[in-house]
Amino acid sequence: MTEHFDCIVIGTGQAGPALAVRLAGAGRKVAILERWRFGGTCVNDGCIPTKTLIASARAAYVARKAADFGVSVGGAVAVDMQRVKARKDAIVAESTNGVEQWLRSTPNVTVITGHGRFESARTVRVGDRLLEAPEIFINAGARAATRGIGGLDKVSYFTNTTIMGVDFLPEHLIIIGGSYIGLEFAQMYRRFGSSVTIVEMAPRLIAREDPEVSSAVHAFLEAEGIKVRLKATCLKVDQAGSGVSVNVSCDEEPRDIVGSHALLAVGRVPNTDDLGLDRAGVAVNARGFIEVDDKLATNVPGIWALGEVNGRGAFTHTAYNDYEIVAANLLDRDPRRVSDRVPAYALFVDPPLGRAGITESEARALGRRVLVGRRPMTRVGRARERGETAGFMQVLVDAESKKILGAAILGIEGDEAIHCIIDVMSAGLPYTAISRAMHIHPTVSELLPTVFGELKPLEGT
């Protein structure tokens, strides 16, 4: 027998639960499906657990540097990985249970556990149950990519998901992939006490960033004892005793790096290969991401895709904003669009990178006059007081309109200070909204007016 609903939501990541509750509150009968763990990537093996682990790693790092601040902790700093994991697990469980209880206690919401697959554009099967609804929302997320490297079938390795179960200290962790996920785990495990080597195929770390950002991050990671091998174009893995060997070059020595464990951090793939999208007629691109328009609707009327599965943003905050856009258009008659939001994200190494808008390379490609302002973190009082002066601030401004095009704050509290930039960009205001504001001293944000006050033409524009 077919069960009839007004809406079906597939997945309980950041977009799904909020949308289900909002739709139910508007009087719709909603079914929400979850095949594994409530909360999706962010809650279970993304933002929340990794930042919890990063906090433990930073505590160890600060304790080791206590003498620099005139503080004696006495003896060597020891890290108990079982207690570190237990703390992480407790925080994750609180979040996961909170999402599930929220959904199960919401009127008009039916929670169904199991894997949902389309049987048509209006029906979804979960085990023996067939669900039907005129509106279906896909929030299926993505997972770690595990293809493209020879020998993976011969060795054991971690992904960002499976490493969440680790309660011991790897002797030597080789991380394949020098982008956001790889760098966060590299610094984290180095601070826990592991030897760490990053292997990256590109000529520099986090290649999508400007070279100055890549160089600065590379420098402070190496200063903590992390080894980096770039241009690893002949990449394959093999067993080496009880450990793993990573072949990084076909002709340049050393050709192999041997470690005790390997972490694969080479990107993400969308969870679209087992949803039955072909039966619903939903279009995906060459990488498997669901194609959506500016309001997150697919090519099939009545079906939307939100979160990482649509390829329009790989972050918790973009997924939640997807929910806001869909809800605004469906329920509020408020025509919000994906193209209205300011691109923004952070890299949570220490010090962090806060990024908004476009990069310097992208600014040069615009074909119009651009102004740039820069200031090293050595000139920021808060950074000097904390003894953390790595990094810099950079802002990009359109010379004609005076509007901010982009900014990067790589340094202490850069992930917080960047919101000054995001808010002004979102409001469509000129940079003078910041440069003329009175900021509190001593903070990181107080230096932003100074940076805007030193704007100069960007070379090449």
Image: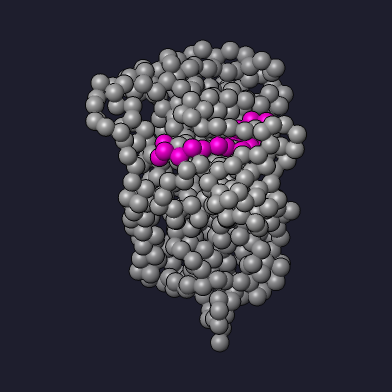
Residue 337, percent across and down? Answer: 58, 47
Up-down relation of residue 384 to residue 80 (above or below): above
Residue placed most toward the observer, 377 or 446: 377
The magenta stretch spans which residues? 191-206
Q: Is residue 200 in the magenta section?
A: yes
| Residue 129 falls in image quadrant | bottom right
Quadrant containing the N terminus is bottom right
Residue 72, percent across and down? Answer: 24, 26
Up-down relation of residue 427 to residue 268 (above or below): above
| Residue 440 falls in image quadrant | top left
Residue at left 49%, top 13%? 453
Residue at left 44%, top 67%? 24
**Colouring chosen for the image of the structure:** one colour
Q: Is residue 129 in the magenta section?
A: no
Residue 345 located left or right of residue 68 = right
Quadrant containing the C terminus is top right
Visible in this render: residue 56?
yes
Residue 257 located left or right of residue 71 = right
How many marks do you count on the picture? 0
Residue placed most toward the observer, 8 or 129: 129
Residue 439, percent across and down? Answer: 36, 22
Residue 355 located left or right of residue 439 = right
Residue furthest front as drawn: 241
Residue 372, percent across and down? Answer: 58, 18
Residue at left 55%, top 82%? 128
Residue placed most toward the observer, 233 or 49: 233
Residue placed most toward the observer, 124 or 378: 378
Up-down relation of residue 325 to residue 234 (above or below): below
| Residue 299 falls in image quadrant | bottom right
Residue at left 44%, top 32%? 350
Visible in this render: residue 433?
no
